[in-house]
Amino acid sequence: MPRAAPTLVEYPDALRGAEGPTLAARVSSYLVAEIQRGRLRAGQRLPGSRALAVSLGVERDTVVRSYDELIAEGWLTSRAQAGTFVAAELPVRSVRKPKTTRVAVPERVAFARPPMPALSIESISRGAIYLGGGVPDVRLVPREALARAHRRILRTSPRTRLDYGDPRGEPTLRRALARMLGEERAIAVDEDGLLVTHGSQHAVDLVTRVLVRPGDRVVVEDPGYPPIRDTFRLAGATLVPIAVDARGLDVAALARACERAPVRLVYLTPHHHYPTMAVMAPERRAALLALAKKQRFAIVEDDYDHEFHFGGRPVLPLASADAHGSVIYVGSLSKMLAPGLRLGFLVPPRELLEDLVRVRFASDRQGDHAKEAAVASLIDDGELTRHVRRARRVYLARREVLVTELRRALGDRIEVEEPSGGLAVWARIERDVERLRDRALERGVMFFVGKDFTFDGRSLPFARFGFGSLDAQELTRAVRLVGEAARARVLRRK
Ligand SMILES: Cc1ncc(COP(=O)(O)O)c(C=O)c1O
C-alpha cells in the first residue's frame, strides 16, 4: 500500500500552496512556479535530486519522478554527467502573466496624443530607415577619444568620479561648458551658475518642478515638440498653445493670452524652431523679452542644436540678451555629441539655482561624474570642437543630397528649401501628406508629418525629413522609397 501523503504542515514552506494530485506533481508545480517567477532561469542548473529532496523534505524518488515529468513536458532537460537544467526554450504556458494590482492608482495624466508612428528598433536593424527626427549620426562621434578619456578618468580618479559628488555636475564639465557658453554663445555664466543634467528633457523637467504648480498656465509652441508638453502636463499645468510662423513665436498672440490670464512659463525653441526650423526674428525676440519683464513669466529657451547653423550669421540665444533674469537657458549635447550620452545643461537666473539643485538632488541626486569628466576633457582638448566642425561639413553635404533627392523623387509635389540650420527639413507637400507617410511606412521608411506636431492634432500640409543620421547612400535609398510610395496607385487616384 502506498504511503499516505503526509499533511501539508509536515512540509517545509516551499511546497505550501503547490498543488497537484501526487507529491511528485506538487514538487513539479512548485518548480514550474519558480521558473515562471524568474527565480529559476532558462538554462540554469538544478540541484541534484538528493539535495533537493532533503531541502523539500520529501523522498529522493519523488524528486526523480518530478524531474522526469518536467523533462517530458519540456520544462527541464537532462544532460548525461552534467545534471538537470531548466530548458533553454520554455513551454509556451511559461510566459509570465502580469499580476493585476490592488494598488490605488490616481487618475491618469492626460498625456499628449497617442505616440507618433515609429519604426521599431528591430525593424530599423532589419533595414527599415528612420528619416524622422533631425538626429545626429552617432557613427561620427569620436568614440576612441571618449573611451580613452573615460578609461583614464576611471583609472586615475575613482575618489572624485565614482563617489557621491556635486548634484550640479562634475566641476570640470561645468567649467568647460561655462567657457564654451561665454565664448560661443555670449552667455555670461561661471561654473557655479550652471547645472549639468541628463539632457534637455531632464532640464525642462527640473525647471517645471520648481516653477509650475497644478493649474498654472504654460505656453507651448504650436506646432511644437510633443514630448515637452508631457513634461508640463505631468506637473498639472494648463497648456496654452501659441502659433509659430516663419518668424518664430507669435509674440502678439502671446501678449493677448497674457491679458486673459497670467502665464507662468513660456517654452520655446527660438534658434531652430521645432519642427519647422524657423529662426525667431530679432524684433520678436526683443518683444518677447519685454513682455516677459512686464508679465513676469519665465522663458525656457530650448537651444537643443545650437552648433548646426549653416547659413548666415550665427544667431545668439535669447539668454545672451536677457537683462532681467527672465530666461532659463537649456542646452544639450545630444546633437553635438550623442543623444544616448544623456548630457544637457541648464543656466537659470541665480535665484532659482538653489531650488533646482535641491529638486535635482531629490529626484536623482547627481549625474555620472566619470562620464561628465570624460566629456569635459574632450571639450578642453579641442576634440569636441573638431568633431562639430567635421560633422557640420558632413551634415551640410547630406542636406544637399536630401533636398536634391526629394525634388527628384517628388517633383512638383514638394516645395522644399534648405533651412539655415538644424538637421531636418520642413517641406510643403500639399497633397495627401499623411497618406504618403503611411505608404512610405509600409515600404520601411519613417518620417513625420505636420499633424504629428500640432497641439490639437490638426493636419498641416508639411513633412519633416531628418538628414543627420543617414549617409548619402542611405538618404538616396530612403527618398527613393518615398518616391515609390508617392507613385503608388492609391495616391495617384486622388
Ligand atoms: C526641441 C527639442 N528639445 C529637446 C530635445 C531632447 O533633447 P535631449 O536629448 O537633450 O533630452 C529634442 C530632441 O530631439 C528636441 O528636438
Image (tube, rainbow, N blue to C red):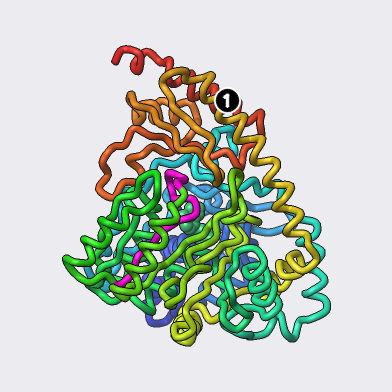
Mark 1 lies on residue: 404
Nearest the eye: 331 or 323: 323
Can you say whether 221 is above or below 167 in the image?
A: above
Nearest the eye: 368 or 180: 180
Quarter holding the C terminus?
top left
* Residue 21 showing in the rendered view: no
SS at badge 1: helix
Q: Give the range drawn in magenta.
A: 264-278
In this view, the residue farthest toward the left is 260
Rendering coords of residue 374 (x, y %): 74, 69
Rendering coords of residue 83 (x, y %): 68, 59
Rendering coords of residue 390 (x, y %): 74, 47
Picture residue at 34% right of the left edge, 70% below the top: 292
Does the magenta segment cover residue 344? no
Picture residue at 54% right of the left edge, 43% below the top: 420
Q: Mark 1, residues whose alpha carbon is within 10 Å: few (<14), some, or many (≥20)?
A: some
